[in-house]
Image (tube, grey):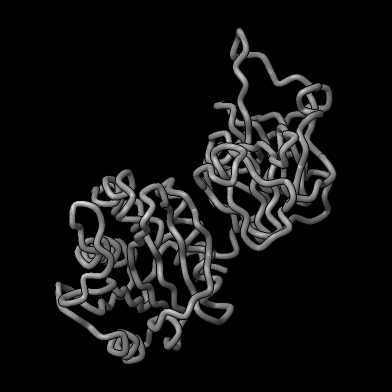
């Protein structure tokens, strides 16, 4: 189960003031009860969608209005969720009077967005550093960092674990720094007579997928992987040929790169598709998480789809939609070298985490 915890920073006359215990007691925890739930910028079904939650996700609600909406925070911004799809959970947020300090007892400890190793890494903290605890879940503790944000740390890496008889070993199941020995197929979508989606300013999907594929391939090679490209220039390759290329090699992972389009110019974000199989789902989950973390783009989640290149493949396969070329803000970002680097790093890290599980 993924858990989304959103934090709120309130500025008073002095930045040193802490959130009062009265306010903390007003915060409620809700769990999502439907498969897909839109997160909107204001309490209205016509408001822009800024994110999506899935069944089992949890949020912190800071206000519930009379029209059936709960206020939370998503990506650091105020957001609203329809309350009829939420169920209230027991609240375990620490108040000011209950606040205790947590000391880090290991070097370069990772701080994550949620209480498991499946969540993205947002920070690293050093040994002997100390932070106020604001929440606890199973073997994880949520702390308030120096900048006011919060994140989750494995309890066995803190002084809270000293009374435990044994420590879990799941924090770093493997330390894969090299992809040497892995064969990875990168499939730049479309090409030649097939332009793919056509975005603003007459931008062709086939062109920017090729540019991104080259950047991803280079990062993978730098990490030690053997990379096979289904095309290396602007020419047409059939869907059958793309899957045949994957079968012709001892392929470990197949990744198809694409960009999305929509008539509404405000629709945006990254999504990852898989067809069938636990391995493909696990790969999609790792890559999607790292892409959203690396690029700070909206996460549109993981979707099960029947695209030919992943449906007819016999290895773990995913198709990634790396943003909307019909969204003017995303299109400007998508075409930068900075975005290519962030995507390439996200895919490499996602693959590393997939092989490490």
The answer to which image quadrant residue 131 occupies is top right
Outermost residue toward the top in this view? 13
The answer to which image quadrant residue 70 occupies is top right
Q: Is residue 103 visible?
A: yes
Q: Residue at x 21, y 77 (%)?
A: 231
Q: Residue at x 46, y 61 (%)?
A: 271
Query: Residue 8: x percent and y percent?
Result: 63, 30
Say which quadrant the C terminus sits in: bottom right
Above or below for 303 versus 115: below
Above or below for 84 versus 127: below
Looking at the picture, tell me which residue is in the foreground, 65 or 126: 65
The answer to which image quadrant residue 236 occupies is bottom left
Q: Residue at x 81, y 39 (%)?
A: 92
Say which quadrant the N terminus sits in: bottom right
Q: Is residue 345 left or right of residue 138?
A: left
Looking at the picture, tell me which residue is in the foreground, 161 or 352: 352
Query: Residue 48: x percent and y percent?
Result: 49, 44
Q: Residue at x 69, y 18 (%)?
A: 18
Looking at the picture, tell me which residue is in the foreground, 115 or 108: 115
Q: Is residue 238 left or right of residue 82?
A: left
Query: Residue 329: x percent and y percent?
Result: 32, 43
């Amino acid at each position: 189960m993924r858990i989304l915890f959103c934090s709120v920073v309130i500025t008073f006359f002095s930045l040193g003031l802490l959130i009062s215990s009265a306010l903390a007691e007003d915060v409620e925890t809700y769990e999502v009860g439907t498969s897909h739930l839109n997160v909107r910028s204001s309490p209205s079904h016509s408001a822009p969608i800024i994110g999506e939650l899935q069944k089992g996700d949890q949020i912190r609600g800071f206000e519930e209005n009379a029209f059936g909406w709960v206020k939370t925070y998503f990506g650091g911004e105020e957001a609203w969720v329809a309350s009829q799809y939420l169920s209230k959970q027991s609240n375990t947020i620490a108040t000011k009077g209950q606040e205790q300090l947590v000391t880090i007892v290991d070097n370069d400890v990772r701080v994550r967005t949620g209480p498991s190793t499946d969540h993205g890494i947002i920070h690293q903290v050093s040994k002997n550093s100390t932070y106020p605890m604001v929440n606890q879940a199973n073997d994880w503790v949520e702390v308030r960092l120096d900048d006011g944000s919060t994140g989750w740390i494995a309890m066995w890496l803190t002084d809270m674990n000293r009374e435990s008889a044994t420590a879990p070993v799941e924090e770093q199941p493997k330390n894969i720094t090299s992809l040497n020995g892995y064969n990875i197929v990168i499939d730049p979508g479309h090409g030649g007579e097939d332009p793919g989606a056509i975005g603003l300013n007459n931008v062709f999907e086939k062109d920017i997928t090729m540019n991104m594929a080259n950047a991803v391939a280079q990062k993978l090679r730098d990490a030690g992987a053997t990379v096979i490209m289904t095309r290396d220039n602007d020419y047409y390759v059939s869907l059958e040929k793309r899957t045949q290329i994957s079968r012709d090699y001892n392929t470990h992972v197949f990744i198809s790169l694409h960009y999305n389009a929509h008539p509404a110019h405000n629709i945006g974000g990254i999504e990852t598709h898989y067809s069938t199989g636990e391995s493909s789902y696990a790969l999609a989950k790792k890559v999607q998480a790292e892409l959203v973390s690396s690029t700070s783009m909206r996460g549109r989640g993981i979707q099960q789809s029947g695209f030919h290149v992943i449906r007819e493949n016999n290895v773990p396969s995913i198709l990634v939609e790396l943003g909307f070329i019909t969204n003017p803000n995303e299109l400007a970002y998508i075409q930068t070298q900075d975005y290519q680097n962030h995507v390439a790093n996200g895919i490499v890290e996602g693959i590393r985490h997939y092989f490490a599980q």
